[in-house]
Image (cartoon, grey):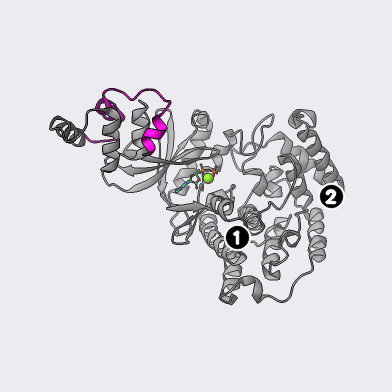
Amino acid sequence: MAITDKSKGADAPPPDLLAVIRNSGVLTDRQLEDIRGKMLKGNYPFDSLELAEKLVREKILTSYQANRLLRNKPHGLAVGRYVILDRIGSGSMGRVYKASHRLMGRVVAIKIVAPEIAGNARIVARFQREMKLVGRLDHPNVVRAYDADQLGQILFIVMEYVDGESLTQKLRAEGPLDPADVVNYIAQAARGLAHAHEMGIVHRDIKPSNLLIGKNQVVKLLDLGLSVLMEADQHSTFETADGIAVGTVDYMSPEQACGKEVDGRSDLYSLGCAMYHLISGRLPFQGDSPIERLGKRIAGLPTPIRQVRPDIPSNVVKVLDKLLATSRRDRYQTAREVAETLEALLEKKPSRSIGETFEDEIPSDEYVEGTSEYAQQLDVEDRPRPAGVAKPKWNGKIAALIERAPWSAVAAVAGAIGVAFAAGVFVGKMFF
Ligand SMILES: Nc1ncnc2c1ncn2[C@@H]1O[C@H](COP(=O)(O)OP(=O)(O)O)[C@@H](O)[C@H]1O
Ligand SMILES: [Mg+2]
């Protein structure tokens, strides 16, 4: 059984497991009395390890809880009215757990925000404002947020639990996905985004790991409103002298990378990057370092997808092309438009594969020409930033360079930065 394996090598099990369980708050007083009664009658063993195994078999404890309790780590298994059942995963902003409501029994996912972020009063205040908006979202393609709270040092968000996997996990397990499936997933994500945008929320961190797919094939957007937390995160992009850019670098729009005000169209660019990655298994912008890859997207040179997957139908290439337009003026203007376009492609789809329905193939060299032009169209107008969003220094420098230099010069600078970064130089200080 998993619990015996995991406890090997760790501290010896506590002699009085019942006391540890009581401390954890995982079970009610009534359940504890029932267990004690059964132990006294000889129905349950006194040995801690055997007792834990018995309680797991009888589904009174989960394996995760039993392992924690056997290692004498009862703290954190009860969060407010929720009891932690299992650990789902961890990401850049904290850890995610499966949990159940103590009274109502509803199974939820809880994200416990990393303490270094939760300790930042300014970010917490912005987070609380954002959660007011997020609480109003209600759409089948958006993970529902039920609650957000702070208990002492613990900041957490309670949300709908999706029994499934993220598109990153799916990509890892299966490799590049069928274009028809991707069109379906991205269409659903676009529906969710349309709802969020109409409610005044820009996601700012659209990426495959924030797209969950349930066992029923419904795609749901995760982490809406949480980009405010990423300002304090050291891993999502890279450290700078005065802040961290919001959004994971490989899916970030050029205007976001430049520290410009973002709007819904920035999410559409990120959606394009996610779509590209899911279909081809590769990121649209290749490079050895995050800053090199960022430089390439600012210069507007995605690797033509047909170089990676020549069988992509032209209509899908066209959608990708428009999503990944460097200038947001050239992108789809609304998520609804993206959803409708993709849904129309799906309607035309025969039962085999979407790739076999399109004959007007675009030669890949035409695509390269189209994308290289984007560099000259990058909109770098310096509009006011939304209140409270820190503007990293390097963003401004890159933006200023682009305003002055032709795209080829920017590409050269980005290349040079990439080389320097790869050599371990702290670019923030060296260049900016
Ligand atoms: N509501 C949820 N339901 C089910 N799984 C979830 C939910 N929220 C997050 N997860 C899973 O938890 C893990 C960590 O998520 P997260 O902290 O958002 O990571 P990331 O920084 O990669 O976005 C991911 O594997 C994700 O699929
Ligand atoms: Mg996430």
Q: The disc labelled 2 sits on which kind of residue?
A: Trp
Q: The disc labelled 1 sits on which kind of residue?
A: Leu
Q: Is residue 15 magenta?
A: yes
Marks 2 and 1 sit apart, C-alpha to C-alpha, by 33 Å
Q: Quick check: 129 left or right of 86?
A: right
> Which residue sits at x=83%, y=61%?
369
What residue did someone put label 1 on?
177
What residue did someone put label 2 on?
407
The magenta region covers 2-29
Q: Residues within 10 Å of mark 1 (few under 14, many from 20)?
A: some
Query: Which is nearer the eye, 46 or 395?
Result: 46
Q: Is residue 362 visible?
A: yes
> Which residue sits at x=33%, y=40%?
62
Residue 34, numbered label: none
Query: Which is nearer the eye, 90 or 262?
Result: 90
Kindly report which numbered mark, 2 or 1, lies closer to the viewer in this rendering. Answer: 1
Q: Is residue 406 visible?
A: no
In the image, residue 126 lies at what x, y percent? 51, 38
